[in-house]
Image: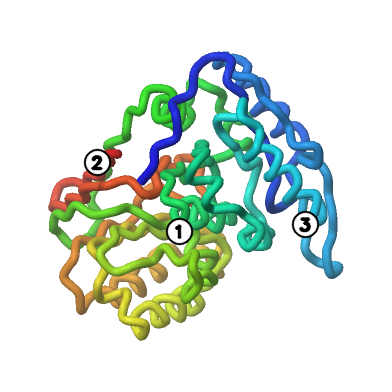
């Protein structure tokens, strides 16, 4: 995997909205944090816009405008990182228009999560690592000195890869494995299965999260992976946060996922802080990770 050049003071960071509409004050917050770090924030021309497609879907702008902003960020040689302002829906529309060879030859840090999982898949297809992590909202609410924002800063400026140690969970399955780390929003990634952008692969440590997907809907996706022969052949599984489903019954969701992976033997870690929650730990997509699950802790150590 290709590692983008480390950021230094004075480098430009583009703020773009390839998916949903972002609150303007959250763009302001990201701009402020980047300036405090010594970077030069560059807003996409259509970053703050709002556009409704088919009467129900709120994008930041029409596809042509979102794509133009993203393309400008990619092709500006002074832009060294791209922060996606928020998720929502729409990133998948950009995939067929991206020049993957150009991304590989001119690697830049990509930061975002949720719907931005589709763009992480493009980076992975191009062979470039990227950062699955919070976006403009987190920078605005918590500032540059927050734990999550500092982890991102250290990854992109020093190449310091995170190592996390989290509390055990009753459903955890012990074990240790070293393998490529990929994942993100489960529904988004499942929509890319059987395409060139699929990153849910046998032999990988997969991390998953989702929002507003009901227990049966997530089970349906996992059955798809089982019947495709992928779920049985993962190297490891990290179960993040599944939020805002009916009744918000976290126990039922975790019980279902536990039952779905019960026939297999790889390490599984539950209740990992990834997803639509305030403590959404950055994950370096495409890194080589060691996942160790024991009775006392889950440890995830990434390297590139």
The quadrant holding residue 45 is: top right
Residue 176 vertical position relative to residue 197 in the rendered view, above or below: above
Q: Which mark is residue 209?
A: 1
Residue where numbered disc 2 is placed: 301
Foreground mark, 1 or 2, reads 2
Pick whichever of labels 3 and 1 is earlier in the sequence.
3
Pick whichever of labels 2 and 3 is earlier in the sequence.
3
Q: Give the CA distance from mark 3 to mark 1.
A: 26 Å
Q: Give the CA distance from mark 2 to mark 3.
A: 38 Å
The quadrant holding residue 140 is: top right
Residue 175 vertical position relative to residue 34 in the rendered view, above or below: below
Q: Residue at x 81, y 66 (%)?
A: 56
Q: Give the CA distance from mark 1 to mark 2.
A: 19 Å
Residue where numbered disc 3 is placed: 63
Residue 198 vertical position relative to residue 32 in the rendered view, above or below: below
Q: Which residue is situated farthest in the bottom direction here?
A: 227
Q: Secondary structure at mark 1?
A: strand
Q: Residue at x 34, y 67 (%)?
A: 201
Q: Secondary structure at mark 3?
A: helix
Q: Position of residue 275 (x, y in %)?
A: 48, 51
């Amino acid at each position: 995997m290709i590692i983008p050049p480390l950021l230094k003071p004075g480098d430009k960071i583009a703020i773009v909205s390839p998916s949903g509409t972002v609150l303007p004050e959250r763009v302001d917050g990201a701009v402020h944090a980047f300036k405090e770090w010594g970077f030069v924030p560059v807003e996409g021309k259509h970053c703050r816009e709002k556009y409704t497609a088919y009467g129900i879907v709120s994008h930041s702008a029409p596809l042509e405008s979102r794509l133009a902003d993203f393309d400008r960020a990619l092709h500006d040689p002074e832009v060294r990182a791209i922060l996606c302002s928020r998720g929502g829906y729409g990133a998948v529309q950009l995939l067929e228009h991206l020049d993957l060879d150009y991304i590989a030859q001119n690697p830049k840090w990509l930061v975002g999560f949720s719907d931005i999982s589709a763009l992480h898949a493009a980076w992975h297809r191009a062979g470039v690592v990227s950062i699955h992590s919070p976006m403009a909202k987190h920078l605005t609410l918590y500032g540059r000195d927050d734990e999550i924002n500092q982890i991102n800063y250290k990854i992109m400026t020093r190449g310091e890869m995170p190592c996390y140690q989290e509390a055990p969970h009753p459903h955890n399955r012990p074990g240790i494995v070293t393998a490529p780390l990929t994942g993100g929003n489960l529904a988004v990634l499942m929509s890319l299965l059987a395409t060139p952008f699929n990153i849910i692969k046998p032999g990988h440590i997969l991390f998953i999260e989702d929002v507003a997907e009901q227990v049966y809907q997530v089970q349906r996706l996992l059955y798809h992976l089982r019947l495709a022969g992928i779920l049985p052949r993962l190297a490891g599984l990290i179960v993040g946060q599944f939020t805002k489903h009916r009744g918000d019954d976290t126990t039922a969701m975790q019980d279902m996922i536990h039952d779905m992976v019960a026939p297999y033997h790889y390490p599984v870690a539950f209740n990992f802080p990834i997803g639509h929650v305030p403590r959404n730990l950055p994950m370096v997509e495409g890194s080589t990770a060691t996942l160790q699950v024991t009775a006392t802790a889950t440890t995830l150590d990434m390297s590139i």
